[in-house]
Amino acid sequence: MESKTIDFERGWDHVYKGIKQLRRILEGLPEPLFTSGEYVMLYSTVYNMCARNPPHNYSQQLYDKYREVLEEYITSTLSPSLRGKRDEFLLRELVKIWVNHKVMVRWLSRFFNYLDRYFVDYRSLPALNEVGMTCFTDLVYREVQTNIKDAAIVLIGKEREGDRIDCSLLKNVLDIFVAVGMGSMERYEDDFEADMLRDTGAYYSRKASSWIEEDSCPEYMLKCEECLKKERDRVFHYLRSSSEVKLIEKVQHELLVTYIDRLLEKEHSGCRALLRDDKADDLSRMYRLYCKIPRGLDPVADIFKQHVTAEGTALVQAIGAASNAPGVQEHVLLRKIIELHCKYMAYVTDCFQNHNLFCNALKDAFKVFCNNTGTDSSSAELLATFCDDILKKGGSEKLSDEAIEETLENAVKLLAYINDRDLFAEFYRKKLARRLLFDRSANDDHERSVLSKLKQQCGEQFTSKMEGMVTDITLSRENHAAFEDYLRSNSAAHPGIDLTVTILTTGFWPSYKPCNLNLPTEMIKCVEVFKGFYETKTKHKKLTWIYSLGTCNLSGMFDQKTIELVVSTHQAAVLMLFNTSDRLSYSEIMDQLNSTHEDLVRLLHSLSCAKYKILSKQPDTKTISRSDYFEFNSKFTNKLRRIKIPLPPVDEKKKIVEDVDKDRRYAIDAAIVRVMKTRKVLGYQQLVSECVEQLSQTFKPDIKAIKKQIEDLITREFLERDEENPNTFKYLA
Amino acid sequence: MRRSACASKKTGQTNSTNPISCSPSDLFRSASSKASSKEMERIDNLFYFYANRSSGMIDPEGIETLCSDMEVDHTDVRILMLAWKMKAEKQGYFTLEEWRRGLKALRADTVSKLKKALPELEKEVRRPSNFEDFYSYSFCYCLTEEKQKSIDIESICQLLDLVLGSQFRSQVDYFIEYLKIQSDYKVINLDQWMGFFRFCNEISFPDHSNYNPDLAWPLILDNFVEWMQAKQS
């Protein structure tokens, strides 16, 4: 390339020739395209005009000429073609001239490229592309921007009504809006998007107001879902993705938010009706539609909660009212509650995607009616009885293993809704003890699985005692083997009867009344022998004998045949008295046995007034009185070789409730002290709420009970009232 | 509520000082004023007039005599006020120290002067700045056993009537009625006692419109208000 200075006129002449050629090409006239040689010449000319020292440096002039050329091109060729055109035609023409303009700018910029490389930066001037854009914006865009915006919005409106439109045209038009922004989305947003959104809002507002009148809730929701889908498609096909969020929000607002109350409360098809009629699909749709809207699900969850509460309450009342056979009715109640729970849990999982709001709604609903059984027994007791029925031998269920597991699992889940969890634990423990000790447990695996489910749900502390009980039984079996070895190797140790002793660790088992019954000598010997054995094992532990829990097999030598009687130890003690006396009065038995009146009446009743009359009573009435006489009933017989004489257990319900109340007082006391020890000074209401929080896992404390304990602690000088503020308490170290 | 008056031991220990010599703990070591030591002598003599010879204290019998000499019933509240002035520790007994303290403060060295001082004493006690202290004192004064922290219902009713009856007649009447029929509490402790005083001062009666059971009022008062509301409806 030759490097020589060039005169401006001559240089510009050359370049301008090239520009004219370019214009002819763009107009579609038969014109040969530029060869690479021609292009290089043009480029070099510009180069030579710019890469010089002044006064031969024509950069500024060329820069100005660049702009001039473009402006001239636009005003003479491009703009005119737009005038007079409207709507879709306008849009089409605009796109066409935009394309042309872009080509022109591209080629021109290549010719004038040298300016871009140095001059532009040196003078901090806009680059050539920018200049091109600015010309277009000023001379074309500004004039037509309102019209094209309106035309575009009209097209969109048509599409909404179902017409087919030219999506690629719209896309190209919107590209212009973006391009004109020169790097920012401002033009797109201000000059197009804002009005488009407004128009969208008005459109859907109109639609919604008529749909809400005519359509049922499911129909309306279907329409909403479709509209939202179509709007998303719109974004995909021609709108900018940045519009999606605002667009969807607008549509949701008009369709779903504005009319939410009317929609959900629709008389025959609203949320309540859908729940009533089990319309899972519609409910799923409702969830999908409202889950994206902030707090949109709140009213839905609320209606769900009300519905479940109403169903549950009605259930409890219906069964409570219809009951006549106790025990059965309660069993049925729990079954039904479990069914209800499974049903609505399915809703929560399937329709409502396990959303927190609905999980809590379900929980709150169940808490309301699960604690109010309308019977004498608390729900804690009912649940414990229910489990007992399933777990014991010959229990009311003749179900498969899986069915049993499932039922137990569901039963444990209900525990989460019961306030008096500690009461349940106590009842369960009592019943577990009976099952374990009287060998009434149907299946060890089920027992263990329930305990592990309870542990999972309520924590280790909840089940630690029960697990201890189960372990005790296992250990006792091992212990028994050791006892037998001891007997074998110790000829002096001879109990005289087959003896099995179960050792219970005191802390794990429910507390039992110790008794001072006088045992028959045969049994006393057994006790001594076992004591001897036990002392060889450990000297540190003390054995307390609870005869009320034992069983005894006696052979009754009746006239007709000998029958084996399975009785409790107490019953056996009574019967053995008749080995030495033929006839005994109530008071004689009382003296010899050293029992309480309450117990004795029960014992004698079971042996003389119940199903199997082992003893005959004079007078032969249905109840025991202190003036009765008893004799061994030698005439007694039964077709079985072995019969069990049941001894109905004492109703421990009252005691259990009392025990739990006492434990609660201690728990409340400990909680208050714990809180105050940490906080040192605390207001009354805060103290109460922190205590409730601490105890919530186990039970729901009565506020009055907490107040009472606080006062007790004041008397015991753990706390004092603040002198200035009687509602604040201080911890006394 | 101050515990100071009650936290001390309840043994009612006397400071059986030798009446002739003045011990260093004597509170009345005055300046060498002949008049005041004369007064002291008269006060001491008056003490020994009523005191029990063997115990060296004025016992219930002595107090009864004193009361009849003053022509005041021994169950009158002013006797309790006198005890308060003396800061007497044990109910029914006055020690020499306590006697001296009270009579000196009242400037009484004869029975008639003492009697004349009673109205002034009553006014002093009933001043709001003193009354709360007197009120809590009266409770502690009735704790006769060592480690006793509460007073039985019967005695509380009498005490309430005596101490608050003139000021809060209707509250006291209703509360006494309630105490007698309820069975939750067999005794009342200091916290409940003071709570009732606060109740009388703060809560509008008999509508209880500004009573809030969610605050830390003693439980017995919550129950009392509930009972009253049930009665009124």
Image (cartoon, helix red, strand yellow):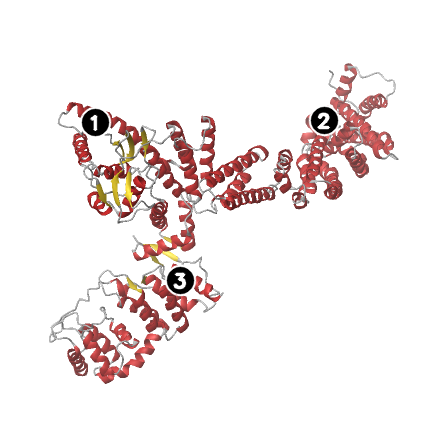
Q: Is residue A429 left or right of residue A153?
A: left
Left/right of residue A418 with respect to residue A15 in the rendered view: left
The type of residue carrying mark 3 is: Leu
Question: In which chain is the residue bearing label 3?
Answer: B
Query: Which mark is on residue A115?
Result: 2
To which chain does the residue with label 2 belong?
A
User: Which kind of residue does numbered mark 2 sit on?
Assistant: Leu
When asked about the image quadrant of residue B45, the answer is bottom left
Residue on which disc 3 sits:
B221
Q: Position of residue A453 (x, y in %)?
A: 42, 32
In this rendering, the answer to whether A174 lies above or below A658 is above
User: In this orientation, does residue A255 appear?
Assistant: yes
Among the 4 quarters of the image, the one containing residue A515:
top left
Is label 3 on the same chain as label 1? no
Measured as percent of width and height from the top left, residue A367 is found at 49, 44
Q: Name the disc covering residue A483, or none.
A: 1
Contact between marks 2 and 3 (CB within 8 A): the answer is no
10 Å crowding of disc 3: few (<14), some (14-19), many (20+):
some
Q: Is residue A111 above or below residue A123?
A: above
Residue A48 x/y as whole percent: 74, 22
Q: In the image, what residue type sits under mark 1? A: Phe
Using the rendered image, report if marks 1 and 2 lie on a common chain: yes
Separation (CA) of disc 1 from disc 2: 109 Å
